[in-house]
Amino acid sequence: MKYKPLLERPRTFLIDIDGVIIEQSNKWDDGRIPDEHDFKELPSSRRTINRWKADGNKIVLTTARPEPYRFRTEHQLQRIGIMYDVLIMGLPNGQRILINDKKPQEDIDTAIAINLDRDVGLGGIEI
């Protein structure tokens, strides 16, 4: 998927972890803590995110994983080599809605929503 850049200045990317960066594990849903070996990095996700970060963009990772698993999640992201600025945990599993204002001097949408099929990774996205 190719998207026209919104603006030339840095952007903020809000990216879910499970099912987008890392293969979805149903163990979280069962109340079990997945083992380190249960995690599989999805194709091109690290390369894509780290390229966006290197280009000066902000990376905000989001997850429904409970807050008590922050250390484990941060360790996992570090082990995989994902660069990010903020990690937001404990979100509900429901829809996530981004609301942003349009700049009056620029007739360009300042928000984009991209829905990916689960576990395909970020390899096909060009922004």
Image: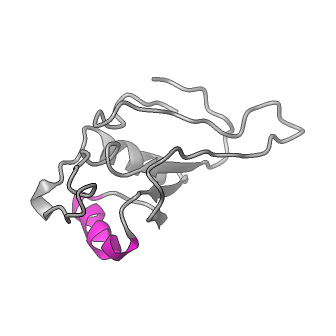
Residue 76 screen position, x and y as percent: 24, 64
Q: Is residue 8 magenta?
A: no
Q: Nearer the viewer, residue 96 or 87?
A: 96
Q: Is residue 26 left or right of residue 83?
A: left
Camera-side residue: 5 or 62? 62
Quarter where residue 27 is shown: bottom left
Magenta stretch: residue 79 in it?
Answer: yes
| Number of numbered markers | 0
The residue drawn where x is 51% and y is 33% is: 114
What's the residue at 32%, 49% (across, down)? 18
The rendered magenta stretch, by its main secondary structure, is classed as helix
Q: Quadrant of residue 73 in the image?
A: bottom left
User: Residue 92: where, in percent of width, then height?
Assistant: 47, 56
- For the record, the magenta segment spans 67-81
Lateral position of residue 26 relative to residue 49, left or right = left
Of all residues, the one furthest to the front in this rendering is 30
Q: Does residue 102 appear left or right of residue 77 in this picture? A: right
Residue 52, position in %: x, y?
Answer: 47, 47
User: Which residue in the rendered view is the most extreme toward the left?
Assistant: 37
Residue depicted at x 22% and y 50%: 25
As drawn, the residue found furthest toward the top would be 1
Please identify the quadrant where the N terminus is shown.
top left
Q: Nearer the viewer, residue 42 or 28?
A: 28
Q: Residue furthest right?
A: 104
Q: How is the image coloured?
A: one colour
Question: In the rendering, at what x and y percent does residue 14 appear?
Answer: 52, 50
Q: Residue at x 83, y 42 (%)?
A: 103
